[in-house]
Image (cartoon, helix red, strand yellow):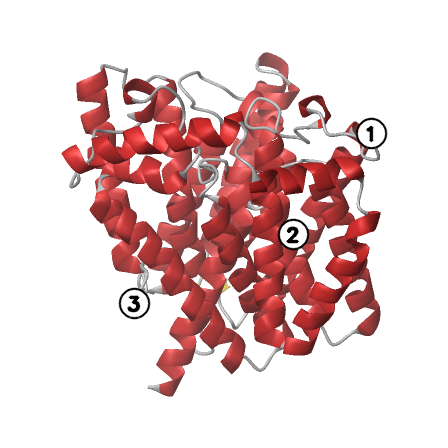
Amino acid sequence: MYRIDEKEFVYLDWRWLLLAGIGFSFILLWSMFVLGLKITLALFLGAILFFCAVFSPEIPLLVWTLLIINEPFMTGTFNFGSGVNLTNIFLVLIVMGWLLGSAVRREDFVRPSPINIPILVILVFAIISFIRGASFFGYSLVGEELNSFKRYITFYIVLLLSMNSFSLRRPIYIIALFGVMVLGLIYEIRVTISQHSAVASWHYSHKMRIPGSFEGGGGANELGTYYAQGLPFVFALALEHPYVPLRLFSILLVLLGIHALFMTYSRGAYLSCFLGLGGMSWIKDRRVFALLVLLGVLSYPLWPVSVRERLTSITHEDASIKGRKNVWRIARQKIMASPILGYGYNASAFLLPRDTHNMYYDIALEMGLPSLMAVIYLFVRLLFIAYRVWRKADVWFLRAMALGLVGSILALLLGNMFGTRLAYLPINMYLAVSAGIVARASYEYARDRA
């Protein structure tokens, strides 16, 4: 039986469950001999995720946040082409389980929230953009463009799922999310440090930049963005967790993460991380902010020369900066010629000499200025929601989640001025799930107050 509340239950006949389990076991046995071990494992995991999505929807979303580790398996093991792989299939199973679970619990599918409207606007404009792009530029509806488009809108879908799946009545899952974040960061820090052996080089070289585990789906800039948006949550644990040893461990992990961030030589990620951690410390305690600034100034001469050279190169226009400014100038002209609907998805590949390396220009060019305003409004509204939840929460894990979200959103808003990172799911899934949790907390606080 499955509990709805203290007085209501849904009874499941164990005989039907047993029959379904036996039938599925035969399917797995057949798959083992005919399709192979990997596909059998994928079927097994998919069934577990669907079952969990019905009764404990937080579990598949926690698995989803570990894309930094499991995406190579999910995209390479079960692939039908045209971007149809386990990542897409598992997301469909999670959505189906969420809808069925909401019906079983007799809950609203989508709870009231100030972020519902901007998400709806973004998704509607995104679909229009894809249809216009397919019409204008002639790419196939089953090609690579569809795959990248799905990856782009997945962030908003997971944000909506998280907001309607996590509950404050089950805090163990919110606490478990911090464990998932720490596990992912430890994995990526290990991969980064193992790839890099020349961080103490006397001079910077582009050959020193490494991709971490983002081969085939990104590079050094994406890896740097992952650290810039993920480390704020660990730093929030150091600021909010009541257990001193865990605070010390979190500080150590932040220091290792910054060390790994340095190895990416991503200037945008440097600035984004500094803004995120600095903004969090300013909100938490001005003395913490002053301490971070003092430590940064005093330790700067000890940073590797290559890192200092890369950071100071921001002050002068190199070929990369000049190229981006030229593309932005052309993009502004195109945007003003079609400001409402843009030109369609992936328009920058057809209308510009190179990628804009700027999320805001890309959205305005492809989906129009109304969509860009909806995206900016969504993240700014989430920023204020996180701040209010941090002020009101009386438990450490919600305070840490909200404070970490503040830092991560600040890093995202700045970092995406230097790149388009929303399409890289492993970078943003921590942010999407945690934003959904904080939005859900804000909803429940408002409901209790009413």
Residue at the image position 22 percent from the left and 30 percent from the top:
334
Which is more N-terminal, label 1 or label 3?
3
Residue found 69% across the figure and 56% down from its top: 179
Question: Residue 279: image x %, image y %?
Answer: 57, 65
Task: Look at the numbered disc 1 and give the secondary structure of its residue.
Answer: loop
Q: Find residue 181 and name its label.
A: 2
The amino acid type, in three-letter code, at marker 1 is Ala
Q: Which residue is mark 3?
A: 112
* Residue at the image point whose x is 55% and y is 42% from the top: 427
Q: CA distance from mark 1 to mark 2?
A: 27 Å
Q: Evaluate if marks 2 and 3 touch, with contact meaning CB atoms under 8 Å apart.
A: no
Residue 352 location in percent, x, y? Answer: 32, 22
Tell me: residue 400, above or below residue 46.
Answer: below
**Quick one: which residue is furthest to the bottom in this view?**
449
Residue 252's spot in the image, x, y percent? 81, 57
Q: Are marks 1 and 2 in contact (CB under 8 Å)?
A: no
Does 49 sit left or right of 230 as displayed? left
Using the image, determine if residue 118 lies above or below residue 184. Answer: below
105 horizontally vs 238: left or right: left
Residue position for label 1: 198
**Residue 50 visible in rendering:** yes
* Alpha-carbon span between mark 3 and mark 1: 51 Å
In front: 347, or 208?
Answer: 208
Seen in the image, is 62 located left or right of residue 260?
left
Residue nearer the viewer, 56 or 181? 181
Q: Secondary structure at mark 2?
A: helix
